[in-house]
Image (cartoon, grey):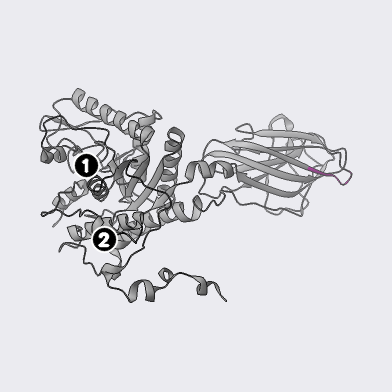
Amino acid sequence: MNPYERLDSSAFWRHAVASKSMFDISGLWAPQFAILPSDKIATFGSCFAQHFGNALSKNGYQWYCSEEAPEGLSNKSKKRFGYNVFSCRTGNIYTTSLLRQWVEWAVGFSSPPSEYWEKDGRIYDPFRPAIEPDGFSNLEEMESSRKNTIQSFLKILLTADIFVFTLGLTESWFNKSGRYEYPLCPGTVAGEFDPDNHVFVNQSFSFIRENLLEVIKIIRLLNPNIKFLLTVSPVPLTATNSGRHVLVATMASKSILRGVTDDIVSSSFNSKKKIALECIRNGDFKFDLAGWEANGTLKVLADKGLQISHNIENSFCGIKQRIRNSGECESSTFKYRVLIRSPKGSIVHVCLSASNNSSVGAITLGRTIEDKDGLEEFCGTVKVPWKGDIFLWVGSRKKDTYAEIVSVSVKRCEEEVSEKFFKDVDYFPSYEIINSPVFRGSFFEPNQRSVNPVGVEFVMKSFFNCLHGEDIAKDSIITVRDSRKEDVVCEEELLAAFGGK
């Protein structure tokens, strides 16, 4: 026997794909948690997220909208002014960093900048530039509208049962001096582009991942039982500022986004893998702490690349080693274990610090070695207030002391809370359904960018079939396709107006 002999037919391309009509390919999603008609389901993100809201409403599910349109407004006008497009009037949220910005505004970690745009005597919100197509009449009206949306967004975070977010782009624009993000490049809808202050950022895997993890963590602190469903928009880029062909830029962008969702859902938290820094074992590092000169120079018997410290505060004589952060961990608390060998009766100090300066974020332990073999274990925790390196200090205030670092291990204290914060995070493969070569581009309009109604319907029927179980009758799912194509609000499409040069 080998592991492949016990796999289901869905694991084999010949059985699951090649032997079927593309419209009969099924079982592409195995839901990690129940989604009930009574659940309050919020949707945000790229333009494709709107299809989830529409389909949920039409199939008896509770699509959660916390910012209602004024009474008497027609459906066409509601959509034009950003009502009932997403769960509140945020407009498109294309990136995880922009989502984090909205979350931090909602919970009060930061406040929206005072920036506003003016065009033809009307005021535009830089963070919802298309929400009022003709702009606001004055600044007070704009700020009041945004405040209402932020309050509505906070209500979602506090009370939603399921948060659906569709990742759309890696390309983004930031204000350099204010260090905040715009949903669209300034100067496209309104505002003026400033090349000295408006910075293009094509976001990396680690940046996107870090922001999404922080969003999940913050929301879970507010609403411990909320569940997250991630998707990636299948819609190609309208335009790219990356310097590459738009087709190449699209594939790179979507691949990165898909990689982030897979890492979070499959590899990191739902699989209950523990988050940890690299554990480092350092045998054979021996240091002679005798022979210190007045300036604190340390004579090293066996230098294996450890750094030397000079004039440590209070004449603390010792050595310093940088324990490198894995690069993927944000600020957090770390647990450490240091095993030291030194002659019995020696007084050895161990310090773990979040800075090259041992006075910053430091935990210091001094201990007399009592063990006859000279072994002593130093354990504790240290708070690292930023993403970066951790420094280990070992030394003594007594001369003629010999010390050997036997082993060092450091790991984040997140093992217990990872399940609490990061359970119930799932991914639905709308991106794969539309973009896979198996479907031969059938679900795109002739422009090879817009998803046609047949594609939307196939995606949403796949969603409900997988949710309910494949044994249900296909016609029990209400069609999501109208006799005409539904208008979808996609602010990025405005960039198409600048092409053709």
**Residue 136 seen from this side:** yes
Above or below, 467 against 413 in this view is below
Residue drawn at the location 19% of the way across and 46% of the way down: 489
Q: Position of residue 348 (x, y in %)?
A: 79, 38
Q: Which residue is mark 2?
A: 474
Label the magenta part by its dominant secondary structure.
loop
Quadrant of the frame with the N terminus: bottom right
Which circle, 1 or 2, is nearer the viewer? 2
Q: Which residue is mark 1?
A: 85
Q: Which contiguous range is marked in magenta?
A: 372-376
Who is closer to the viewer here, 132 or 244? 132
Residue drawn at the location 55% of the way across and 39% of the way down: 332
Residue drawn at the location 48% of the way across and 70% of the way down: 7
Who is closer to the viewer here, 482 or 249? 482
Who is closer to the viewer here, 175 or 122? 122
Disc 1 element: loop
Separation of residues labelled 1 and 2 (CA atoms): 27 Å
Disc 2 element: helix
Residue drawn at the location 34% of the way across and 61% of the way down: 470
- Left or right: 479 in relation to 416: left
Q: How many marks?
A: 2
- Left or right: 131 in relation to 356: left
First along the sequence among labels 1 and 2:
1
Figure quadrant of residue 354: top right
Which residue occupies the extreme right position in the image?
372
- Which kind of residue does numbered mark 1 sit on? Val
- Which kind of residue does numbered mark 2 sit on? Lys
- Left or right: 424 in relation to 273: left
Q: Position of residue 481 (x, y in %)?
A: 17, 55
Figure quadrant of residue 370: top right
